[in-house]
Image (cartoon, rainbow, N blue to C red):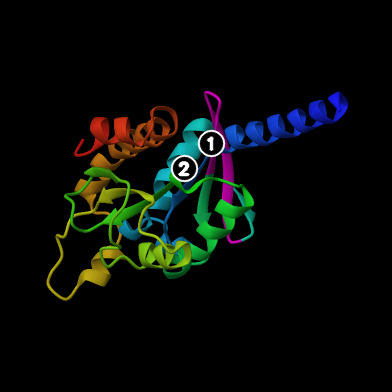
């Protein structure tokens, strides 16, 4: 009986340890479109932020199932960085696959996307919300069957001529934007690390509108 109890307790401890480990893992998804022609477009800011982070941390991406993936360790946390290879409109398939594969809880998901409704470079972290007409978010919502997941919106402004929204979103950054972009990328990386280390509420208070 004692031997059985020890075995049961050991099994219980293993479950608790696995749950604890999963809470220390985060899936950080940068949205974008694959291909060189999209690499410096406004719509690809999610890819750009993760590329900047990987470059600063001297890590590289590996092409795996449904995306390019890299792993970053930050003070006891494991950040799985994902750039979906499904193209923007099918991003949800990749997000769902990697959440399940890595056994990452939904509250540890962070999706990085561009936002036309925010001035250029404005950062905004939210825990839920509509897709706002963004096809990448729309597919993630569809595949996860919820609007309650963390999203980090990077403002690209709405400085386009009426009827030219697609051209603007898929257009490259202007000279003035490029001059300020590096500093905005640096702050974006700080936001991501804060999300994993300090939690979503503290990070929202510290970075939203910054």
Q: Pointer 1: residues within 10 angstroms few (<14), some, or many (20+)?
A: some
Which residue ends up furthest to the front in the rendered image? Answer: 1
In depth, the one of 110 and 116 nearer the eye is: 110
Q: Position of residue 101 (x, y in %)?
A: 63, 52
Place residue 174 in its image quadrant: bottom left
- Residue at point 12% right, 69% down? 161
Which quarter of the image is occupied by the C terminus? top left
Q: Is residue 175 magenta?
A: no
Q: Position of residue 40 (x, y in %)?
A: 37, 55
Residue toward you, 99 or 167: 99
- In which quadrant of the rendered view does residue 124 lie? top left
User: Residue 170 appears at what percent x and percent y?
Assistant: 32, 65
The answer to which of marks 2 and 1 sits earlier in the sequence is 1
Mark 2–mark 1 distance (CA, rounded to whole Å) = 7 Å
**68 drawn magenta:** yes
Q: Which residue is mark 2?
A: 108
Work out whether residue 34 can be spotted. no
- Left or right of 118, for residue 80: right
Quarter of the image where one finds residue 66: bottom right
Secondary structure mostly taken by the magenta-highlighted segment of the chain: strand
Q: What x and y, as percent, mark residue 3?
A: 87, 26
What range is drawn magenta here?
66-80
Q: Secondary structure at mark 2?
A: helix
Q: Is mark 2 in CB contact (under 8 Å) with mark 1? A: yes
Quickly name the residue at label 1.
23
């Amino acid at each position: 009986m004692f031997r059985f109890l020890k075995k049961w307790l050991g099994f219980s401890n293993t479950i608790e340890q696995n749950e604890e480990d999963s809470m220390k893992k985060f899936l950080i998804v940068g949205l974008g479109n694959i291909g060189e022609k999209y690499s410096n477009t406004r719509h690809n800011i999610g890819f750009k932020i993760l590329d900047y982070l990987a470059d600063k941390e001297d890590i590289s991406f590996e092409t795996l199932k449904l995306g390019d993936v890299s792993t970053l360790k930050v003070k006891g946390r494991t950040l799985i960085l994902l750039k979906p290879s499904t193209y923007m409109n099918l991003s949800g398939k990749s997000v769902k696959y990697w959440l399940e594969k890595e056994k990452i809880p939904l509250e540890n998901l962070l999706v990085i996307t561009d936002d036309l409704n925010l001035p250029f470079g404005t950062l905004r972290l939210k825990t839920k919300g509509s897709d706002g007409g963004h096809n990448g978010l729309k597919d993630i919502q569809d595949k996860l069957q919820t609007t309650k997941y963390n999203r980090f919106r990077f403002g690209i402004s709405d400085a386009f001529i009426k009827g030219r929204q697609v051209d603007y979103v898929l257009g490259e950054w202007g000279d003035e934007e490029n001059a300020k972009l590096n500093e905005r990328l640096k702050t974006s990386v700080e936001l991501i690390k804060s999300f994993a280390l300090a939690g979503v509420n503290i990070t929202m208070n510290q970075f939203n509108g910054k």
